[in-house]
Image (cartoon, rainbow, N blue to C red):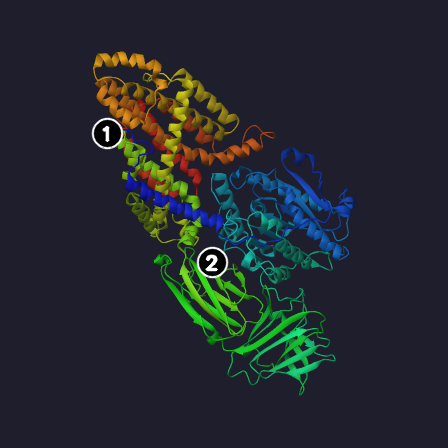
Amino acid sequence: MWLEAGKVPGAAAVFYGALAALVLLGVRDVLFQYEENRCSMTYMFEYPEYLKVKLPRKVSRRYPAYELYLYGEGSYAEENRNLLLTGIPVLFLPGNAGSYKQVRSLGSIALRKAEDADFKYHFDVFSVNFNEELVALYGGSLQRQTRFVHECIKVILKLYKGQGFAPRSVAIVGHSMGGLVARALLTLKNFKVELLNVLLTQATPHIAPVMPLDRYLTDFYRAVNQKWIQKAKEIKNLTTLSVAGGFRDYQVRSGLAFLPRTSHQSSALCVVTSAIPRVWASTDHLSIVWCKELVLATIRAFFDLIDENTKQITEDPQKRMLVLNHHFLRHPAKLYEESPESVAELTGEVNWIQIKTPKWSYTVYNESDGKYFTFPLSGHRKPYSHVYCQSSMLDTNSWIYGCINSSSSVCLRGVDLSWKTELLPTVKTVTLKLQDYPSLSHLVLHIPAVNGNKFTLDCEFFNEASRTVQLPVTHLFSFGLSSSKIVLNSTGLIHKVQLQHFGQIYQAFNILIESSCQSLKERKPTVYQLHIPWSYEDSFTLSQVPSSTEISAKLHIAQPQNDTAVPLLNIYSSSDCQYEVTVKTSFLQVLGQVIRFHGGTLPVYIISNILLAYGRQLRSLISTGHCTDFVPALTKAARPYKVEPIVNIVKFLLGLNWFKGIWDILSLPELDAVTPNNQNLWFPFVSLILFMFGTGIAYWGSILFSSSLKISSSLHVALTRPSRLPSDPSLITRRTVCVAVCMFFLSWTTCGALAILMTYAHYAFKVIKLHSNVRTELSVLDTCPKNSEQSSACSKRETEESCASSSDGLSEAAAAATSSSSPKGSTAIDSVVDSLKMHITILNLLTLIVLLSCPSLIYWLKNLRYQIKLDPDPCRSTAFMLTAILGILMNASTAKVKTSKLLKIAAHLPLPLSVATVVFAPMHLDRMPYFVIIPLFLHALCCIV
């Protein structure tokens, strides 16, 4: 009758255990399987100080929890205590649970850079204190934060009034949700776009919330993204840079940090930190703020954005984009110049050496005199298509030229080709297509006079076709059992491997590169670059040769539909080394991609499975008169074919114009099941996979929940000596009404999530108490003889001693009770046990609802000193409904439900609600409670009608 927690069907346990294990493996890949932290820590040179900026009284009263600070150190802090500022304003906005003190890395390095320039220019770095609010999980304060930032911008600009070169706009650096708040400024009616010049966001989820837990959060995102589309022309002068952290940032996946493609593309840039020159490292969600390499790149870019005439950030959006491209996309190993001279005079008392071979290498050490090496191009244009040069001297001077005016042995003038350089972790390289430079007669490499420095220069002419090979990646369902391999026999400095058929986010591979060299001489590390042509998410790996190196290949952004570009594995190598490249599908990383992109929707599929099991239990009341256990109900009812075909049919019909028209006329919301397709997040059978994952989690989650309930009831038995089975209680008592009124009042005056949690705790305690009573009764009946008279006497005697006895489990005790007690007593026990099973299923449904409401409860607790009532409260309406419904259900029994006229409706309703949950809730988790409340409300009606 009762399935004990420790005795589950073997085959089902293994199958659902395997599903749960796959989920855990995917979670492990996301949380732990990534590159080591290669960022350097940023340290302050002097003690950091945060100077509080006095806000207008009206602003302080309206936003008592928020503050504005100016960052300073040492003499700068002393000189600016009166806030008589003359610099360039930059405003830092912290993110979810972020501190205003996170600005110190940015502010400290900006001060050091200004000191190096003798304070010719300097930045005044401000920071907003948002009281470390959980805005990524509770969206009710996002609008309030946005309005406060607007007030801060006005206050900051007033500080410069009367100053020469007073700024008319500010630059904003927003971390995490702070970047979204900055973008939301455009949704304010009175905000002028001219107040912003540069917006730099760090690990900001622009596309959608990481966990859409309440409607205020999803509505805020919709309003921001729609406004940016509507105001695309107005914000063309606003330069936006979004920086994502890569795979180390498991809190905000990098795909969310890329701005919507419909945004102002000409003035927006999105890049992953692993692709940023001189950073070349993935950052986690917090280290992206203090990563020294990234902060240095940011500060260098800010100083290059300064207009020498206005001593403020330039108002030229084209120049701003050139600066950001220089520092964040392709660094030419030269200092930024606004108008670089393209032609240079090649003069000086230096040696000129002509090189006629197609492959050349030169090692420089203690060179007292400079040299020019010239490569005549006329003899190389026919047999070769490209020329490639690299230098391990990573200075910022020009080093390669194209000769346009030469004498017999000397080049007089040359085009500076150094701006075509690409900086890599160990070398700077230039690749030129000879066909693009028909007017050049020679290629010239300049080696300056150096003392004590040792570096190497290499050049070679080559045909691109001979250095480019195609390597098809293995199929997704090969599970790493098969591989695709290619050997690069030709020796050369650069090789390109095209990874064919690699363009979807569900693909993940291990690329094994084995190198072998002809000699054992010392070499610089080989650079492996995984280049993704449709987004700036390249990654670099360094390896000593000869060696065996494994590279992980997976995507943040799927290949656009009309894009035919192919990902490349670029190998920058030594000329005498050969390479063997092997590609295998990594099944564990594929699981990681599933969790990374769709793990946030798992609660939806868990609820969907529990609803199916709940409907099965109600149907068993109709067919057998008894309620089945949750686990066997789940194994019988949780069938994907009950849900997935309906979801796919609706998705197909929405692709038809006439059906879409009817759907829009009825004002029905867009299907969340369609949204992943629109965002290029589609996986093969992803909904089916997630449904099965949800089944495995629900299965083992219920077993753990039953085990914890058993432990709690054992503790209750040991501490309270519970009485025998209670008599059938009334559904609505004076006590029930008082508790409900108190919960209503609590929801209205404080926080709805608090009322939900307290109601859940009350319900759970009553279930534990009922569980204890049932165990006690079964334990008593198990020890009684079969004779009814003796059984009656035994029952009276054992009632007093029942707490001292032990029970092996309710299933065995119930079976014994059936054979040893009277039919009337057995019927009463069966009814209570059935009720207990139903209560446990309801608690399983409520557990996820409580967990999803916890963020707003935590937010309310953190802000309790500022306001008692949470406003707006996403859980208030849910709390009102659940309080009333659970007040009835916690006193309900299956005996009343079985005789209800509404039972057939209640038993068949969970199936369509399970489908509706999958259809409408994955991108709006705030809708889930309503799909739970509806069947519980009907269940409560069954107790009455």
Which quadrant of the figure has residue 389?
bottom right
Q: Residues within 10 Å of mark 1 (few under 14, many from 20)?
A: some
Specify whether 237 is left or right of 653.
right
Specify whether 822 is left or right of 195.
left
Query: For residue 552, which numbered disc appears in the image?
Result: 2
Label 2 with label 1: CB-CB less than 8 Å? no
- Distance from disc 2 to disc 1, alpha carbons, whole Å, reads 55 Å
Determine if residue 303 is in view: yes
Q: Residues within 10 Å of mark 2 (few under 14, many from 20)?
A: some
Say what amino acid the circle numbered 1 marks. Answer: Ile
Determine if residue 691 is in view: no
Query: For residue 378, which numbered disc appears in the image?
Result: none
Residue 318, x across and y down, in percent: 62, 61
- Secondary structure category for the residue under label 2: strand
In this view, the residue farthest toward the bottom is 408
Residue 655, x across and y down, in percent: 35, 52
Q: Locate the C terminus and report the quarter of the image it occupies.
A: top left
Which quadrant of the figure has residue 525?
bottom right
Q: Locate the N terminus and report the quarter of the image it occupies.
A: top left
Q: Please give the residue where the numbered disc 1 appears in the rendered image.
A: 622
Say what amino acid the circle numbered 2 marks. Answer: Ser
- Secondary structure category for the residue under label 1: helix
In this view, the residue farthest toward the front is 520
**Residue at x 61% of width, y 39% of height:** 130
**Residue at x 58% of width, y 76% of height:** 459
Residue 799, x across and y down, in percent: 33, 14
